[in-house]
Image (cartoon, coloured by chain):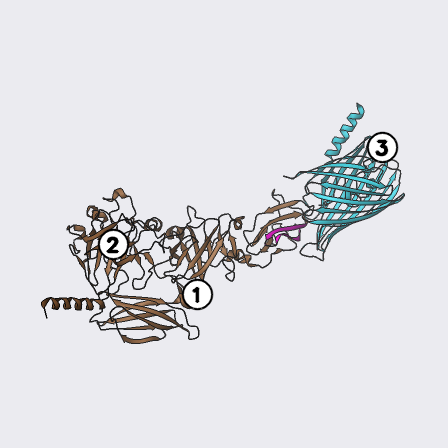
């Protein structure tokens, strides 16, 4: 009874608090691109990604770093030579019950517009039945010499049950306007249900609620199938917008590499890849 | 020589002389199936009449003279009763002399109330039939045959008039209802020409004109028909027929054809011989309008010879806009433009569909080079909707109803030669919300769907500026400015999405955010440029960063997409 009450309170706290995300990213970077954030193993690649919440991590490795790159959408009919891309680098370290993640992302839209994001996430595994993290994100957007900077925060809770892990998060909660006119990002609440690896692979479902007038619900369903101990294929589909993604990952004892494609029915294909090291 | 031989010789001699006479009895006006409620006219269709004019120089007697309307044969007899409504006319006469006009009236005209009496020219011979009706009442498509003989035999046709084959819908009833003019009896029809065969029938320009043939001037009748232009000589042979009604005997007149630039023929003496003077003159193709003048007893009478249609290149008149969907506040109309470098007179032109045609105008409608003219079903209603100069709008005597979605519209010149044909189809109207069809290219055939585009804002009488952007051979989309800053500072607050589309193409516009979600749907293509205020369909400001304008275009090549990217900053 006491345990259930604690779980309930933590859930409420998670939903009521703030979490942080990128300004307008259509999908996660790195390993999460191929499965659109549906495959989450606390002791897997997704847990070690520096740009994901520290609450997703519960493993015995102590340190690691990663880099990822994404090229967004097909070439359009104007500014064909100018692409839209994002690069992310970051690291994590885990000591005792504390996990610390730090990441930096740089987004560039056809040499005109850019975003820089500094991300910090502190999590703990103090509780046996769940991990939780507090996330902070400093987001700067600029065009020419004009820039704006905002500070967001959020919280994520991961409850690993026997057959499924439940991840709850609240993102895009505004903390402070640092400079410029700022942004008006709608808050987003999400609940994810993620299975560990089983005979069918690993599955995940994420339901996201976005604070706006319509198209408030977004559903993502993903699957990862491990063809060999070192290689896995994944795919996911989302609604609002409808996107289909595919990913391929390789991993050794300390290194991982991943590549992914995401198809938007109107805007076309996005391409991404990443590398990760941990020990 | 016995006396009977003398008499016989005299009769033969008279008959021989009679052979030189020019007998020309023309049916010069017919009022059929008068409009209005029959119960307001005593005797039902009592106001029908047939006007005959003795144009020749031989008298016509009523002996054995019959009228046949295709249904019943009546004997033509003199009108004997003196009535106030025909007080100044000639009654009881059995002969229609040269130059005289006679009116065959329904017997029941005697019962007509005063308010509906005709204004009949003084001196008109009044005739009637031996029956209560003219024929079995003149229907809209009835012809009139006047002949000598009996009720069972035709010995000689005196005159024949039938417009049924040429103007099947030239209905006086329709004319009355569509014109908006309150003529209780509707309109009569008259032949355009009587000295040439195969006369075309028109609405009487005066609505009704019993007692005279409208095209006779000072007793003279002049008709012309252009031939085929001789390009090498730059001339147009034109057949002329001139005749003085009642005969030319003793007439010493001269005639000449002149233009503002030249004299085609010096004054020549009139030579009637045993009938009308028929001749041909070569009109130089350096003028569009000539004048034939007849000088008779010191008085000069002129007739215009308009050859603009012959001189002009084929299809100099283009239909440039059409509104086939009549509404309560807007009649059907179409616009024509003169794309040649010379004025063109639409008088006598016809317009119509594949099923029917009507005279566009009986009066002069001169369209100068590059000028527009609107042909509207209801002029007054049209001018209330579009306050244009009244001179730009012409209302034909009668109208051919246009189908809203699938139809053709054709133009014929005054000689009956096809000049223009357009069509429209149901599938063109996918995005039509009540505008007109505007022509975006006069180089293309009017039957080519790429020549037409739906216009949200009709522009009758003016260039089709609202659809000029639909003239592109290939679709293009431009957006700007970059970056787009909808922050209300007055600079770059709106994103302009500018389209150029082939005429037959349809397009839809959507704006996507960088996250792949659709921000805004824009209906189109109704205009060349759309302005986006940086807000979504829900009214919320879109996020800063990249966005995408996606235009889906459906054209002859199928469905294809044009995608443009931009940056929004606040």
Determine whether the residue tagged by mark 3 lies in a helix, strand or loop.
loop
Residue A136 at x, y = what percent? 77, 41
Q: Tell me where the magenta segment starts and ends, as one range.
A: B546-570
Query: Which chain gets the brown colouring?
Result: B
> Is B62 positioned to the left or the right of B170 in the image?
left
Cα–Cα gap, marks 1 and 2:
56 Å
> Is B51 positioned to the left or the right of A148 in the image?
left
Chain to which the residue tagged by mark 1 belongs: B
Question: Mark 3 highlights which residue?
Answer: A126
Chain to which the residue tagged by mark 3 belongs: A
Between circles 3 and 2, the one closer to the viewer is 2
Query: Which chain gets the cyan colouring?
Result: A
> Is A279 positioned to the left or the right of B203 in the image?
right
Question: Can see residue A23?
Answer: no
Chain to which the residue tagged by mark 2 belongs: B
Same-chain status of marks 3 and 2: no
The residue lying toward the viewer, choosing from B503 and A186, is B503
Question: Mark 2 highlights which residue?
Answer: B153
Q: Furthest-front residue in view?
A: B2
- Crowdedness near tag 1: few (<14), some (14–19) or many (≥20) residues, C-alpha within 10 Å: some
Find out whether residue B550 is within the magenta segment: yes
């Amino acid at each position: 009874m006491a345990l259930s009450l604690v779980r309930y309170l933590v859930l409420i706290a998670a939903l009521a608090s703030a979490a942080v995300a990128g300004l307008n990213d259509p999908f996660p970077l790195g390993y999460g691109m191929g499965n659109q954030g549906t495959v989450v193993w606390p002791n897997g690649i997704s847990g070690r990604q520096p740009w994901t919440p520290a609450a997703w991590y519960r493993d015995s490795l102590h340190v690691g770093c990663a880099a990822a790159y994404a090229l967004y959408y097909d070439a359009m009919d104007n500014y064909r030579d100018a692409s839209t891309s994002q690069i992310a680098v970051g690291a994590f370290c885990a000591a005792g019950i504390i996990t610390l993640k730090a990441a930096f992302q740089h987004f560039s839209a056809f040499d005109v517009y850019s975003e820089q994001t500094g991300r910090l996430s502190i999590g703990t595994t103090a509780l046996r039945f769940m991990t939780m993290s507090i996330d902070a994100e400093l987001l700067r957007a600029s065009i020419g010499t004009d820039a704006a900077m905002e500070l967001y925060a959020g919280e994520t809770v991961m409850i690993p049950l026997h057959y499924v892990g439940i991840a709850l998060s609240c993102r895009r909660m505004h903390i402070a306007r640092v400079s410029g006119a700022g942004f008006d990002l709608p808050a987003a609440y999400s609940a994810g249900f993620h299975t560990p690896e089983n005979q069918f692979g690993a599955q995940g479902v994420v339901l996201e609620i976005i604070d706006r007038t319509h198209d408030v619900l977004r559903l993502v369903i993903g699957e990862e199938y491990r063809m060999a101990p070192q290689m896995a294929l994944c795919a996911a589909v989302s609604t609002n917008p409808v996107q289909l993604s595919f990913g391929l990952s390789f991993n050794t004892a300390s290194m991982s590499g991943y590549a992914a494609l995401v198809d938007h029915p109107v805007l076309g294909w996005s391409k991404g890849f990443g590398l990760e090291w941990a020990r | 020589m016995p006396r009977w031989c003398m008499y016989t010789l005299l009769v033969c001699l008279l008959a021989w002389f009679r052979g030189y006479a020019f007998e020309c009895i023309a049916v010069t006006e017919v009022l059929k199936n008068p409009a209005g409620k029959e119960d307001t006219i005593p005797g039902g269709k009592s106001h029908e009449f047939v006007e005959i004019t003795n144009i020749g120089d031989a008298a016509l007697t009523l002996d054995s003279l019959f009228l046949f309307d295709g249904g019943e044969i009546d004997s033509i007899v003199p009108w004997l009763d003196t009535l106030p409504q025909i007080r100044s006319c000639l009654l009881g006469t059995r002969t229609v002399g040269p130059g005289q006009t006679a009116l065959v009236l329904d017997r029941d005209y005697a019962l007509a109330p005063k308010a509906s009496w005709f204004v009949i020219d003084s001196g008109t011979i009044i005739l009637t039939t031996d029956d209560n009706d003219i024929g079995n009442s003149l229907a809209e498509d009835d012809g009139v045959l006047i002949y000598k003989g009996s009720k069972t035999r035709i010995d000689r046709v005196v005159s024949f008039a039938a417009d049924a084959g040429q103007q099947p819908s030239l209905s006086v009833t329709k004319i009355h209802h569509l014109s908006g003019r309150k003529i209780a009896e509707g309109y009569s029809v008259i032949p355009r020409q009587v000295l040439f065969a195969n006369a075309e029938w028109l609405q009487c320009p005066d609505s009704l004109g019993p007692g005279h043939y409208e095209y006779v001037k000072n007793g003279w009748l002049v008709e012309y028909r252009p031939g085929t232009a001789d390009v090498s000589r730059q001339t147009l042979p034109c057949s002329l027929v001139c005749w003085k009604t009642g005969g030319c005997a003793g007439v010493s007149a001269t005639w000449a054809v002149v233009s503002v630039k030249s004299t085609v023929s010096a004054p020549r003496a009139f030579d009637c011989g045993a009938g009308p003077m028929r001749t041909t003159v070569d009109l130089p193709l350096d003028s569009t309008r000539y004048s034939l003048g007849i000088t008779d007893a010191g008085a000069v009478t002129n007739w215009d010879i308009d050859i603009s249609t012959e001189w002009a290149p084929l299809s100099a008149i283009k239909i440039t806009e059409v509104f086939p969907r009549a509404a309560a506040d807007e009649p059907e109309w179409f616009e024509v433009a003169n794309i040649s470098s010379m004025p063109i007179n639409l008088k006598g032109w016809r317009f119509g569909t594949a099923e029917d045609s009507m005279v566009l105008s009986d009066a002069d409608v001169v369209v100068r080079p590059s000028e527009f003219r609107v042909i509207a079903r209801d002029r007054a209603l049209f001018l209330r909707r579009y306050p244009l100069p009244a001179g730009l709008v012409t209302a034909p005597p009668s109208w051919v109803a246009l189908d809203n979605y699938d139809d053709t519209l054709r133009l014929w010149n005054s000689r009956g030669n096809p000049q223009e044909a357009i069509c429209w189809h149901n599938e063109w109207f996918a995005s039509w919300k009540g505008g007109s069809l505007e022509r975006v290219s006069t180089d293309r055939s009017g039957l080519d769907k790429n020549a037409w585009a739906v216009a949200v804002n009709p522009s009758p009488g003016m260039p089709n500026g609202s659809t000029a952007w639909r003239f592109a051979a290939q679709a293009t989309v431009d957006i700007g400015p970059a970056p787009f800053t909808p922050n209300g500072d007055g600079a770059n607050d709106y994103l302009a999405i500018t389209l150029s589309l082939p005429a037959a193409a349809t397009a839809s516009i959507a704006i996507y955010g960088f996250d792949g979600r659709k921000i805004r749907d824009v209906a189109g293509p109704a205009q060349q440029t759309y302005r986006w205020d940086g807000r979504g369909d829900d009214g919320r400001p879109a996020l800063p960063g990249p966005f995408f304008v996606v235009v889906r275009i459906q054209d002859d090549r199928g469905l294809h997409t044009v995608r443009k990217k931009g940056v929004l900053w606040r």
